[in-house]
Image (cartoon, grey):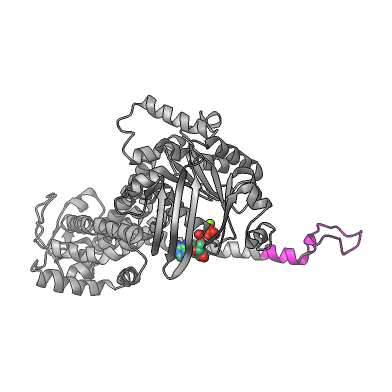
Amino acid sequence: MSSVESKSNPKGSGVRRFAESAGIRRKFRQEAMVKWLLAGATGMMLVPLILIIAYLVFKALPILSVGFLLDNPVKGMREGGVWAPFVGTMYLIVISLAIAAPIGVLAAVYLNEYAREGWFTRIINLAVINLAGVPSIVHALFGLGAFVLFAGLGRSVLAASLTLAIMTLPVIIASTKEALASVPMSFRQACWNVGATRWQTIRHIVLPNSISGILTGIILQVSRAAGETAPIMFTGAVFFKKVQQGDMFPYGLLDQCMALSMHLFTISTQVPGVPMELPYGTAVVLLATVLLVNICSIVLRVYLRSRKKW
Amino acid sequence: MSNPDTYCIKTTGLNLWYGDFQALKDINLKIRQGIITSLIGPSGCGKTTLLRCFNRINERYGNVKTTGSTLILDEDIYTPEVSLIELRKSVGMVFQRPNPLPISVYENVLFGLKIHGATESQEKSTRDEIVEKALREVFLWNELKDKLHRRATDLQLDQQQKLCIARLLPLKPEVILMDEPCSALDSEATRGIEELMLGLIPKYTIVIVTHNMAQARRVSHECIFMLMGELIEHSPTDQLFLTPRDERTADYIEGRYG
Ligand SMILES: Nc1ncnc2c1ncn2[C@@H]1O[C@H](COP(=O)(O)OP(=O)(O)O)[C@@H](O)[C@H]1O
Ligand SMILES: [Mg+2]
């Protein structure tokens, strides 16, 4: 207890009642220290991020141009641009997301809104959490066995996308469930009590109020799908594939494709004599792709929120 | 509409289990139409559970088993032919914490109708009329007529609670169930809600759970005392408070259960 809180003044009439005691000063010092510690941690997170981006862009500067994006790799990948791998990555992102996002969101809605608490749902929830933590190389081997060999898709865009979808699905389910669970129960009660079915409740109240959380979870998985090398290396991505310059749709579903992450790995470790700025340029394009998708999602979120009803 | 001799809600041998735990034990009651009946009893005695039986919302709360019969206006509501949607239109519920939906005041009032697909064919003027009528019935119209398109969750707490009552009215309910509707409100707001309730009868039948015995005495015509899942006493309010028939009722109203 500090003296400020005591009712009578124990120090006699001459002493000021509201003076700062040593204890209070200590608390203030503590408060200031904690604040700086937390701010420092934030700074430590920010500094490397800025340094990485600055370093990459600086190193890639000599080669960055529109041409670098639109040209194909040439001369054994020692010159040219990144068009073929860039389009390949786009393919993989879009197709894997088109598979994983709807299934993930629907499954999460089922688990959060319909499924009764019981051993079955508990096992599923446990499985979802554990699958979300499985390393990508394991997903790669599964994809190889299940899609490439067993399903007979061969190494293809489709097999690689399915593998990425399997990899991102549990995380999408987990994050969507979390977003749904953050909608207060009282909103649901209000709906049920005017006779709304579960689906009406979800459609009119739960989804509109959780959509930005759901989208955030999905978008984070885009970065993962774009960045992983292992799952696509075994299942559909190749070192090199010849593509018409500027061709927007160079790959069929059952073709193999190039991809940025794989390309980056190849030119920085497998091909001798690649000029330094080429891998850095590729990294910048990869980063920009992820950033672009993130910005799209922010715009979509703001738009959905401004519409409120949908 | 009201006839003191018609009963709006009747239960016979109503039992309810949450898993293995029996929350309601052999409840037999008859609640008169067009009056306010209050449910009192120590917390955990099953008041909320009993209330939820009347619109079968218990079934949304997990592993619940019910036996016995519950009749609303002489129709058994636990038969397979009963449409839960129609039932919940007729038997609306108001909660302890006001729960307006995070949409505008106007949309809140019309939400029930919208859910049942009734607003699509209506003219805007008809909808405006419905909203005005409902808000007038809960004494909110004058306060809110210029704020109809404000988000309902930004209103004051007592306005929110009145709005939650107003939200039920366009569905033309028979019964309005209120689960401690004033426990989040100050005494002045509580008065407001009580006044509103007295204005809603005899058009609607009201069942209110309250832990505030003064409130039970002020607003209710009949009073039901429950204890550990059992119905102990059901009498006219004055009689229950002045000359309780059961010793346990007397103990409770004298504050001996806390
Ligand atoms: N969904 C539920 N699952 C399991 N037990 C419950 C549930 N709801 C209430 N109960 C139990 O049923 C008893 C009665 O609860 P309730 O009807 O909420 O009492 P009251 O409203 O009178 O305080 C309590 O013992 C409570 O723990
Ligand atoms: Mg209760």
Residue A49: quarter of image? bottom left
Between B153 and A219, the residue placed more toward the observer is B153
Q: What residue is rendered at 39% in x and 43% in y? A: B89
Placement of A296 over or under B199, stated as above or below: below
Magenta stretch, residue numbers: A3-29
Placement of A217 over or under A141, stated as above or below: above
Placement of A246 over or under A93, stated as above or below: above
How far across and how far down the image is residue A125, in percent? Answer: 34, 68
Check if residue A27 falls in the magenta segment: yes
Between B239 and A291, the residue placed more toward the observer is B239
Q: Residue furthest top?
A: B125
Q: State left or right for residue A4 relative to residue B219.
A: right
The quarter of the picture where the N terminus of chain A appears is bottom right
Q: Residue furthest front?
A: B5
Check if residue A222 falls in the magenta segment: no
The quarter of the picture where the C terminus of chain A appears is top left
Q: What residue is rendered at 51% in x and 44% in y? A: B206
Let me know if residue A184 appears in the view. Answer: no
How far across and how far down the image is residue A282, in percent? Answer: 25, 59
How far across and how far down the image is residue A94, in percent? Answer: 21, 55
Q: State left or right for residue A138 relative to residue A240.
A: right
How far across and how far down the image is residue B224, in percent? Answer: 56, 53
